[in-house]
Amino acid sequence: MSNNTRKREGAKLPDETSVIELMEFTMAGSSYGINVSKVTEIMKRCKITPMTHSHHCVDGVFKPRDKIITVINLPRYMQLPESENPSQDMFMLTNFENVNAAFLVHTVEAMHQVKWKDVERPSPIIYGGKDSVITGTTKLGSKIISIVDFEKVLFDIDPESGILLDEVRVLGERDKSAKPIIIVEDSAFLKKIILHAVELAGFTNVTSFDNGQDAWEYLEHARDNCKTKGLPVESIAAIVITDIEMPRMDGHHLTKLIKSDDFLKKIPVLVFSSLIDEAQRLQGQAIGVNAHLAKPQIGNLIATIDEWIL
């Protein structure tokens, strides 16, 4: 028995009941959520050292132990009222996309396990469409929890901390490619950046979705059409690039469906996520993910696409 086979048999495979662990916090009386895996520590607000010439949503810095951490005032960023009791405010210390930051919020409530299928896409009318900082909503009892796009928050405050298209521009002139690429990303902000990046890299046939359910329905329809017309699977997609965290269906469940389908399983699947750790890699390998890449490595993303489809 191969090592790969042992990994597949020993790992827990995601299914339609895949869940996200959300940490609920509040601002101005409303409930919001962040993936627990992005949070390293919760602590009460403490003394902050102001910084001159900083972004208006940066309160300053503090040093809880051996690292200086930037404090981002999340209510101010979201144009919400400041706390009526600042001494009761909380810090959520986070680490993702190789950035350490503390987000000031009003309260931290509890952790919840929520099924991805119960996370809905945010209404563009209510949450601002393509400029939205909300990636999904879910209902817990009488409360609606809005999941915040922390990647967008960080990039808006410090563009140098986010995805840099210069990593693609330095590749210079490239031949055009019409090979079909499918991108599945729930953050409207990040999807826009990724689409721009693959366009700069010369890929002209790109289809995008903001959740795994819509992507899977597209793939099912395309598969049936190809079978009817006798077309190869390569006419559907040369590669699928997917995030993990998404409303309705997460990226691992989408991958499992692709790799379990006799016709679609040859399509390479690249997971591009801010949540790449050893556990995620092992789970992804168990269901057939071909490559894992941590955001915001946009230059490596293009190199990995080249590796698999050119």
Image: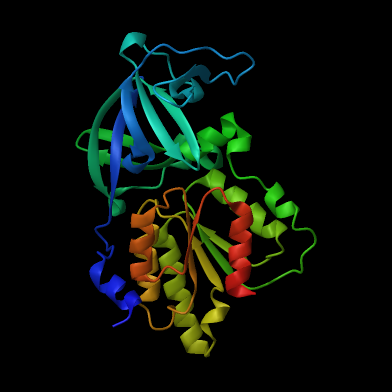
Residue 299 position by quadrant: bottom right
Q: Is residue 173 above or below residue 75?
A: below
Q: How is the structure coloured here?
A: rainbow
Location of residue 180 in the rendering, given as x and y in whole percent from the top left corner: 60, 71
Give the residue displayed 74% in from the left and 52% down from the top: 169
The quarter of the rendered structure image containing the N terminus is: bottom left
Location of residue 131 in the rendering, given as x and y in whole percent from the top left corner: 55, 38
Is 263 displayed left or right of 142 in the figure?
right
The quarter of the rendered structure image containing the C terminus is: bottom right
Give the residue displayed 43% in from the left and 56% down from the top: 211
Residue 212 position by quadrant: bottom left
Is 290 displayed left or right of 283 in the figure?
right
In the displayed orientation, state which residue is furthest to the right.
173
Can the viewer see residue 32? no
Is 71 displayed left or right of 90 in the figure?
right
Q: Is residue 281 above or below residue 149?
A: below
Give the residue displayed 50% in from the left and 43% down from the top: 97
For the image, the number of numbered tags is 0
In the displayed orientation, state which residue is furthest to the bottom.
230
Can the viewer see residue 167? yes
Location of residue 71 in the rendering, given as x and y in whole percent from the top left corner: 47, 22
Is 260 displayed left or right of 124 in the figure?
left
Q: Is residue 279 above or below residue 255?
A: above
Location of residue 54 in the rendering, given as x and y in whole percent from the top left corner: 61, 19
In the displayed orientation, state which residue is furthest to the front.
66
The one nearer the camera, 78 or 127, is: 78
Q: Is residue 105 above or below residue 5?
A: above
